[in-house]
Image (spheres, rainbow, N blue to C red):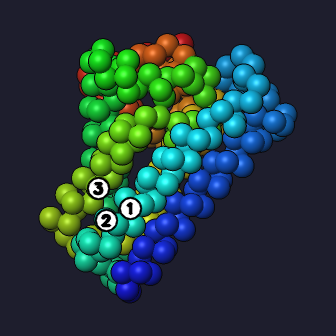
Amino acid sequence: MSTNTIILITLLVFISGNIVAFLYSWLVLYTDTFKNLRIQKAKYKPGIFFKRLPLILLNITLILTVTAVSLYFFSDIFETDFPQQWWLIPAQILIIAFVDDIWFYTAHWLLHANKFLLRHIHSVHHRAVHPHPLEYMYEHPLEWMAGSLGVALGLVVISLIMPLSIYAFWIYGALRNLHEMNLHSGIKSVINPYIPFLKNAEDHDLHHSRSKGNYASMFNIWDRVFGTVIKH
Ligand SMILES: [Zn+2]
Ligand SMILES: [Zn+2]
């Protein structure tokens, strides 16, 4: 598979996820489709969708550009043949998720513990007190790029111990996008409670309404280990 094909498919995976997020936000904000499933009943500010757009579009542009440039130089890191043992793909997805979530927990905890970082960087994301799906991309560009480093770290860890499958990267990229928009949807979780150790929208929604605790994104392990769980 050529480098250009890898870049093109990766960008398509990311862009499709963003389109889903736009549609989901539109349904949440402008229709009654999910009205009865909302976690917080507070009304959204008028025009919030368009108010959030400039920074969200900047962050989308940033991530697409950095991803394309990184793949141009480092696409050799990936094995593009489908692995003979299919289970290597879910195993690698789990490893990336694990590393990504340790990174996210640490960075997110630090963004709250350090008052300078909280005031000048993370406060942007916390303008969303009752978030809607698109707001997982509404954050300071520095925080947005730092958050993406967790995925890169997961890829590097795997490539050091075994051939890294491009399919694991693509599937994780799509799942991470869906998970993040679900966490910020403000809509009660339907599937998440049935998946062991997985964080749900209620956990992260509470983080936004109280601006503390529940720092992990993917798994509920780290908040339990470090005593940062908050509940209703
Ligand atoms: Zn958030
Ligand atoms: Zn936070």
Residue lying at the far right of the rendered structure: 32
Residue at image mark 2: 70
Residue kind at label 1, given as amino acid type: Thr
Q: Quadrant of the N terminus?
A: bottom left
Which of these two is toward me, 4 or 62? Answer: 62
- Residue 101 visible in the snapshot: no
Query: How far across and how far down the image is residue 7, in percent?
Result: 42, 73
Q: Dot 2 surroundings within 10 Å: few (below 14), some, or many (20 or more)? A: few
Task: Find out whether the residues at labels 2 and 1 contact each other: C-beta distance under 8 Å.
Answer: yes
- Residue at the spot x=72%, y=49% of the render? 23
Give the mark, 2 or 3, whose residue is nearer the N terminus.
2
Q: Which mark is residue 152?
A: 3
Task: Find out whether the residues at labels 1 and 3 contact each other: C-beta distance under 8 Å.
Answer: no
Q: Say if 6 sits above or below 214 in the image.
A: below
Q: Residue 166 occupies which quadrant of the picture? A: bottom left
Q: Say if 2 sits above or below 135 in the image.
A: below
Q: Residue 91 occupies which quadrant of the picture? A: bottom left
* Left or right side of 173 for 102: left
Query: How far across and how far down the image is residue 174, in percent?
Result: 50, 58
State how many labels appear.
Answer: 3
Task: Find out whether the residues at labels 2 and 3 contact each other: C-beta distance under 8 Å.
Answer: yes
- Residue at the spot x=26%, y=32% of the render? 106
Give the mark, 1 or 3, whose residue is nearer the N terminus.
1
- Residue at the spot x=48%, y=46% of the render? 59
Q: Residue 67 carries which label?
A: 1
* Left or right side of 194 for 76: left
Which of these two is toward me, 90 or 143? Answer: 143
Q: Is disc 1 placed on a helix, strand or loop?
A: helix
* Left or right side of 145 for 199: right
* Left or right side of 68 for 19: right
